[in-house]
Image: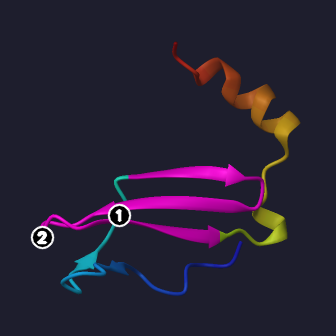
Amino acid sequence: MTPPTRPFERCVQCNRALTAPEWSEQVTPSRLCHWWRCRCGCEFETFEDLPPEARLQPEIVEQFLSSLIVA
């Protein structure tokens, strides 16, 4: 898998370096959505396209992650 091109994200309002999103979600097999929150109060989303070798196959996700889902 290709390493990230930057070590952090920048706040779109104050330009502060943010090291980790509040949460991330795989919105399609090839795309991630990251939700960021800065100390200045700004909240925003970024999207990341996964390279083909990093994409999850639905049958693999079901097999290995279904036992981790808590209702």
Residue ranking furthest to the left: 40
Give the mark nearer the N terminus: 2 vs 1: 1
Give the residue type that dot 2 points to. Answer: Cys
How far is the residue under mark 2 from the one under mark 1? 15 Å
Residue at 66%, 51% in the rendered image: 27
Q: In the drawing, does residue 25 fall left or right of residue 59?
A: left
Determine the secondary structure under disc 1.
loop
> Could you say which disc has been placed on residue 20 in the image?
1
Magenta stretch: includes residue 35: yes
Residue at 77%, 72% in the rendered image: 51
Q: Which residue is mark 2?
A: 40
Q: Nearer the viewer, residue 33 or 18?
A: 33
Residue 14 on image: x %, y %: 18, 84
Q: Are marks 2 and 1 in contact (CB under 8 Å)?
A: no
Q: Nearer the viewer, residue 4 or 32?
A: 32
Residue 45 on image: x %, y %: 44, 65
How many labels sit on residues? 2
Residue 31 on image: x %, y %: 69, 62
Q: Residues within 10 Å of mark 1 (few under 14, many from 20)?
A: some
> Could you say which disc has been placed on residue 60 in the image?
none
Residue 4 on image: x %, y %: 55, 79
From the image, state whether disc 2 or disc 1 is nearer to you.
2
Q: Main secondary structure of the magenta part?
A: strand
Magenta span = 23-48
Q: In the drawing, does residue 22 fall left or right of residue 46?
A: left
Determine the secondary structure under disc 2.
loop
Q: In the drawing, does residue 54 fall left or right of residue 22?
A: right
Give the residue type that dot 1 points to. Answer: Ala
Residue ranking furthest to the top: 71
